[in-house]
Amino acid sequence: MAGCGKKGPPSPPRQLAVPSVNNLESKIEANNVILTWTVPEAKEKESPPITGFVIRQAKYPLSEEICENCPINYKPIAEVAADFNGNDRKIKYIKQLDKGFKYFFKVTAFSKNMTSESRDSNIIKFDY
C-alpha cells in the first residue's frame, strides 16, 4: 500500500461555494409583498450554476414581543427556479400577507449539483 507521505487526517476535496443573494428588496402592494433580487454571478469559473432559490419566512403576531438576541424561526415557504432572460437577472416572488403580523424574509441560492446552499441573503423585515 502506498500513500502520499503526508501524516494526518485526509483533507476533503475543496467545495466551491454557491454565491449568495445580497440585494433582496421588498415592495408592498395591496395585500401582497413582492420580493425581488438579482441572480448572483459566480466568483469562480468552476462554480456550478445556480438553479434555484429557497425563500424563508418568519411571521410573528404584532402583539408578541421578539427578544433582541433570540434567533428568528424561519420556515421555507417556496422554491423559485433561477429563470431569467438575457441580461436581466432579476427574480420576483409574490406572497400574500395577513394583517397584524411582523414579517421577516430571506433567500438562499442552491445548485442541483451541490448539496449545500449559499449563505443567507440580507433580511427584509416589516410590520403589516
Image: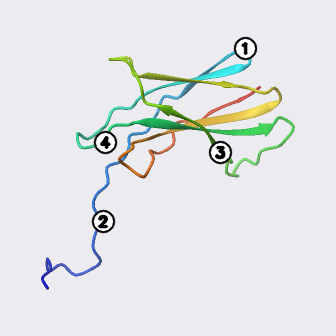
Return the disc, 2 or 1, that comes first in the chain's sequence.
2
Q: Secondary structure at mark 3?
A: loop
Mark 4, residue position: 48
Task: Determine crowd level at label 2: few under 14, some 14-19, many 20+ residues with C-alpha closer than 10 A.
Answer: few
* Residue type of the residue flagged with mark 1: Ala
- Judging from the image, what secondary structure is the residue with disc 2 in? loop
Q: How is the image coloured?
A: rainbow
Displayed quadrant of residue 13: bottom left
Please identify the quarter of the rendering in which residue 49 is found.
Answer: top left
**Left or right of 93 in this view: 44:** left
**Position of the C terminus by quadrant:** top right
Residue nearer the viewer, 28 or 85: 85
Badge 1 crowding class, 10 Å Cα cut-off, few under 14, some 14 to 19, many 20 or more, is few
Q: Which residue is mark 1?
A: 30
Q: Which residue is mark 2?
A: 12
Residue 92 picture location, percent across and down: 53, 22
Q: Amino acid at mark 4?
A: Pro
For residue 50, side relative to residue 59 (left or right): left
Instruction: Classify mark 4: helix, strand or loop.
Output: loop
Residue 122, placed above or below residue 114? above
Asked whether the residues under the numbered discs 4 and 1 touch, taking CB atoms below 8 Å apart as contact, a structural biologist would say no
Residue shown at 69%/51% (left/top)? 69
Q: Amino acid at mark 3?
A: Tyr
Question: Mark 4 to mark 1: distance in Å?
Answer: 38 Å
What residue do we see at 31% from left, 37% from top? 42
What's the mark number on residue 74? Answer: 3
Q: Is residue 104 above or below residue 75?
A: above
